[in-house]
Image (cartoon, grey):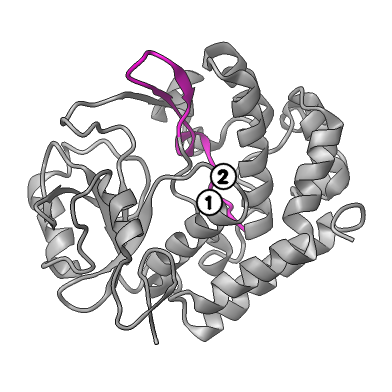
Amino acid sequence: MSRCLATLADLPREGITAAAQHRLAGGRQNFPARVAITRKQAIQWRTDHVRDVMSISGMQDKISVRLLRGVLEPVATGGTHILKPQPPEGGLPEAAEVPANEHLTMLIASTVAGIQASACSLVRLADDELAYVTRRFDRLADGGKLRQEDLAAATGRSPDGGHLWKYDASYEEIARTIRRFSQTIDLDLQELFRRILFSYLIGNGDAHLRNFSFLTEPDGLTRLAPAYDLLCTRLHITEDMDLAMPLLERERAGVASEAESLRQYGAAEFQTFGAAIGLQQRWVAKTMAGLTDARCQERIAGLVGRSFLRPAAQAHYLEVVGTRLGRLRPVFGR
């Protein structure tokens, strides 16, 4: 039995279910399971056409594509989706696993952790390699563009701040910025907490300022944009920090416990973080318990086992989650 490239559900042959196609297309249009370019062609196309045009954050090779009559094709402007082939070999360790890693992590985030995440799937390239594709949430069906501002810009950070400029903050500062700009403050603070807790649990050490954004809806409402660029970085960078940034501002000032200084947080540190950003402790406790209980972990293990990661990478992924659970479970998830 084959699987859906988007949901991992059983299919007679590899493809994408009708419901998943609808979500990926943002309407009734078909969404393809295959893209008629190779990884080499995709990277070369970006080099030739859009290296100085696209404004998508991140280091991974990616190109803008447009969905037109059920076909995804590269475009310099006006893209509806972002396509990410696997990185070149010889750079990032386990580079071939990156598309499946990001897809799996985004799927767990949206279906298990209750996180608002952008629609995504895997697709097969012409060379039969897997690539990751996600629908742009800042694009409207009529081709219009919504205003999106990442948290680096919202907090006044820029590359002029040095090579670690995207990491020069705390998640508490992001919460303060949400209070300044969001028009759905309470919901966005809860969503922020979920994303940080999830990133910690799943081994995502790259949740930096540019991986959070504000989105202004057509009605003028500004809120936290759906999650994007989530993956278990521990599969590729073993010396990675447990989180990209500290939870609290005091940690940046050097006032931190041993666990905080190493960013090896436990339940107590997340309780403190929740209180610092103004969340009710009852809600924090319920959220943490829900993400660390046996039922939730069974669902994570089930998705990992059905994912397109190779068996060794699946085992590593579950090992990372198990290690983080061991730190969070002294209070929660018993």
Name the amino acid, label 2: Ile
Is residue 60 shown above or below 294?
Answer: above
Is 296 a magenta residue? no
**Residue 165 locus on image (x, y percent):** 49, 33
Residue holding disc 1: 110
Is 218 a magenta residue? yes
Q: What residue lies at 78% left-to-right and 33% top-to-bottom?
A: 273
Q: Name the secondary structure under disc 1.
A: helix
Image quarter where the C terminus lies is bottom right
**Residue 26 locus on image (x, y percent):** 28, 44
Is residue 86 shown above or below 331?
Answer: below
Q: Which residues are magenta?
A: 203-225
Residue holding disc 2: 115
Image quarter where the N terminus lies is bottom left
User: Badges 2 and 1: C-beta atoms under 8 Å apart?
Assistant: yes
Residue 188 seen in the figure: yes
Q: Quadrant of residue 188?
A: top right
